[in-house]
Image (tube, rainbow, N blue to C red):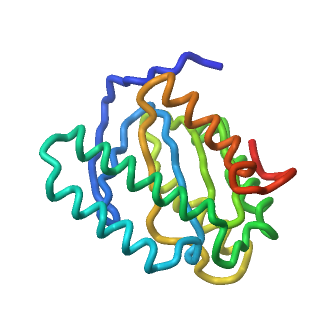
Amino acid sequence: MRHINFIPAPRFVEIHTRGGLVHWQVDDAIYFITFSLFDAIPAHAYAELCRERDRLLRSASTVAERAQIDRVFQLGIDRELDDVRGSCLLREHGEVVASALRYFDGQRYTLHAWCVMPNHVHVLLHIERGANLPKIVQAWKSYTAHKIGLGVIWQRRYFDRVVRSPQEYSDTRAYIRNNPAKAGLRDWAWVG
């Protein structure tokens, strides 16, 4: 495996928001991404998580406090996803998504770990300078929705985080690989 620079000296940084969360796109970085089916989290549960996050953000006074609030918010999302609710279309169509993730591995990005769960997907990947993370995720979603053929299946938003340290990398990789067992799925096929 090539050397990974966890605190890159980026030539390009873009900051934007989607669905209330701040997203950073940094050149030559490793990302942890989670995207999910449209019905993976009940609307009332997601709304409650967002209300709590907004309430906490109103009293946050530092960047570190806001970052901690976002981490807690993501843990809440992960707990909801691990309840494996909704249509769980990926029980039947997991290979479609796994194939899409692997298709451009080594060309547009380098996969470090991935897992297709029944109602969501986790990916740890490295993107090179000039790659466009939102376009990569959109390509996965668009291709797989078309291939599965059931119309709109994915939530518009997704979670992404720049991995900032070797410890965070190791923890994230282990989280992805252990996610099926944590959710009670035995002999789950779509982990890489």
User: How many numbered marks are there?
Assistant: 0
User: In this rendering, would 111 be left or right of 10?
Assistant: right
In the figure, 183 relative to 88: above or below?
Answer: above
**Image quarter (top left, top right, bottom left or bottom right) of the N terminus:** top right
Where in the figure is residue 104, as x and y percent of width and height? Answer: 66, 46
The percent coordinates of residue 166 (x first, y second) are 50, 22
Q: Position of residue 148 (x, y in %)?
A: 73, 74
User: Could you tell whether 54 is left or right of 23 in the image?
Assistant: left
Q: Position of residue 30 (x, y in %)?
A: 49, 34
Q: Residue 108: which quarter of the image?
A: top right
Looking at the image, residue 159 sits to the left or right of residue 107; the answer is left
Q: Quadrant of residue 159?
A: bottom left
Q: Residue at x 67, y 45 (%)?
A: 114
Q: Which residue is at the far right? A: 187
Quick check: 22 above or below 26?
Answer: below
Residue 27 drawn above or below residue 39: above
Residue depicted at x 30% and y 64%: 52
Classify the position of the C terminus by image quarter: top right
Against 22, residue 192 (above or below) is: above
Q: Residue furthest bottom?
A: 151
Query: Which residue is found at the position 63% from the left and 83% from the top?
Result: 151
Residue at horizontal 61%, vertical 41%?
175
